[in-house]
Image (spheres, helix red, strand yellow):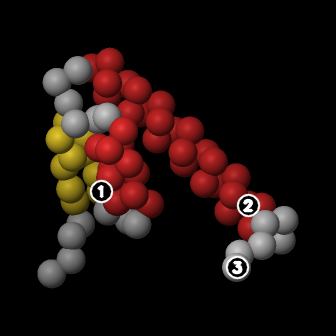
Amino acid sequence: MSVQKIAVIGGGTMGSGIALTAATHGIDAAIVDTSDEQLQRAKKYHTIQITLKELSLRKISLGKIGIR
């Protein structure tokens, strides 16, 4: 049995990190929070982190970052 979807309760630093990690491993992740403001912060965090990861992957594929 493999996990395909998760729900994370709380969109703070830990919840956002858990959801982002799951999503980067192909798992559908939903964040649930009582605060719309916190959900917006989590969305912004994810956008920034995904952009940074994409930039890193592009640099790796171009040989600009070495992996040891």
Label 2: how many Cα within 10 Å (few below 14, some 14–19, many 20+): few
Task: Give percent across and percent down for residue 27.
Answer: 32, 62
Name the residue type under label 1: Asp
Q: Is residue 2 visible?
A: yes
Point out the tag, 3 or 1, that comes first from the N-terminus.
1
Q: Is residue 62 visible?
A: no
Name the residue type under label 2: Arg
Residue 47 drawn above or below residue 25: above
Residue 30 drawn above or below residue 43: below
Name the quadrant of the C terminus: bottom right
Label 3: how many Cα within 10 Å (few below 14, some 14–19, many 20+): few
Residue visible at 63% across and 48% down in the picture: 52
Point out the tag, 1 or 2, that comes first from the N-terminus.
1
- Secondary structure under the numbered disc 1 in the rendered image: strand
Name the residue type under label 3: Arg
User: In the image, 57: left or right of 27?
Assistant: right
Name the quadrant of the N terminus: bottom left
Seen from the viewer's position, the closer of residues 28 and 36 is 36
- Residue 68 is marked as 3
Task: Give percent across and percent down for residue 36.
Answer: 27, 20
